[in-house]
Image: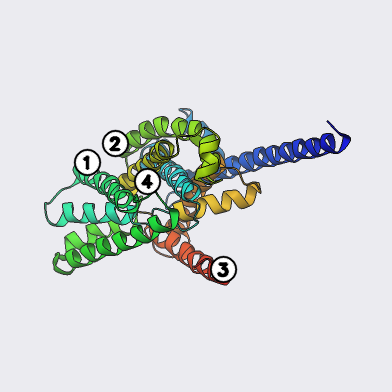
Amino acid sequence: MTAVDAAALAAVAEARRAGATRARAVTLGLFLALLMVFALTLSVGSYSVPLSEVPGILLGGGAPQDAFVVTRLRLPRAVAGMLVGIAFGIGGTLFQRLLRNPLASPDVIGVSQGASAAAVTGLIVFGLSGASLALAAFAGAVGTGAVIYGLARRGGVNGFRLVLVGVGVGAVLTSVVSYLMTWADVALAQQALVWMIGNLNGRSWNSVVPLAIALALLLPAAALLAPALDGLQLGDDVAVGLGLRVEHTRLLLLLIATASVAFATAVAGPIAFVAFVANPIATRLTGGGRTALVPAALTGALVTLVADFVAQHLLGAPLPVGVVTGAVGAPYLLWLLAAANRAGRV
């Protein structure tokens, strides 16, 4: 090995160490920020609980009235928001990285619209409610993902083709929802709005537990496949040369991404743009080209909890969390499309 080769290897190793150090620092910062927002969510409300009392209440102490408000009323909602954000963050990251397209988010490619259409149909047409309605939303997301994959699979899944197919399928499903809303009575239409916008109101442990179990299975699976995901981003030919089973691995990753989004949507509805922005924010913070699953998951949770806090306490009247995330995410989508158009990619 020549001196030039040794110097190049040393420079690469130093860059990797610097990148790993930055990623760890960003992950720690996101985790601490998430803890702070989580505590504020438990503390602030029409009945305020001192922030300093929250840790003691979570450990079983505190005044009975404070403990009731924190543990019975606010904690399930906060945990649901955090887990939903993690699931959307993971799902959006896998979609965007796998398909090498920043537009390949469940909000854009029709998966979220599938959940909405199934839930609204179940509510208005079949009179479903509770767990059966959540199950319908889950089935709608998974079924829509399968249809989009099947339609886009010809000659191998191409990210651009899948986005186009997903946009078309999503438009059809949105039309279905709009049609059902035109003849639904006012009470049903009000309930259906939850499955069109996304809301964390009234979430209980009954909805949190299934999502927590699902994430306990999906997150390790995503972490195990993350190295393969980095290989797939180099292109199918290079991935095959690295010994990857391209179609098999891609299908597994799509299943994990779709399941993550489906479980999250079944709990809180299709909260707009959380999955869309989590990966770009995490990637910009970590400054690396590798898949940043943990930072993206923490970013998704942080975005969801911050948006819910703003929706509940800072806009005059409580609003669904999806209103806030949509107001923030839509301009970002327009900016991304404009930037891609200037670069000649669309």
Question: N-terminal of the two: label 3 or label 4?
Answer: 4
Q: Is residue 330 above or below residue 280?
A: below
Measure the alpha-carbon separation of dots 2 and 4.
18 Å
Q: Amino acid at mark 1?
A: Ala
What residue do we see at 37% from left, 50% from top? Answer: 155
Question: N-terminal of the two: label 2 or label 4?
Answer: 2
Residue at image mark 1: 131
Mark 2 near mark 1, Cβ–Cβ under 8 Å?
A: yes
Residue at image mark 2: 206
Mark 4 near mark 1, Cβ–Cβ under 8 Å?
A: no
Res. 82 image quadrant: top left
Q: Amino acid at mark 4?
A: Val
Regarding mark 4 in the picture, which secondary structure is present there? Answer: helix
Q: Amino acid at mark 2?
A: Asn
Disc nearest the viewer among 3 and 2:
3
Residue 298 shows in this picture = no
Residue at image mark 4: 261
Q: Is residue 60 above or below residue 254?
A: above
Res. 80 image quadrant: top left
What residue do we see at 49% from left, 44% from top? Answer: 236
Residue 268 percent location from the top left of the image: 34, 48
Total numbered circles: 4
Regarding mark 3 in the picture, which secondary structure is present there? Answer: helix
Circle 1: is it few (<14), some (14-19), or many (20+) Cα within 10 Å? few
Regarding mark 2 in the picture, which secondary structure is present there? Answer: helix
Residue 67 percent location from the top left of the image: 42, 36
Residue at image mark 3: 339
The residue furthest left is 126
Question: N-terminal of the two: label 3 or label 1?
Answer: 1
Q: Amino acid at mark 3?
A: Ala
Measure the alpha-carbon separation of dots 4 and 1.
17 Å
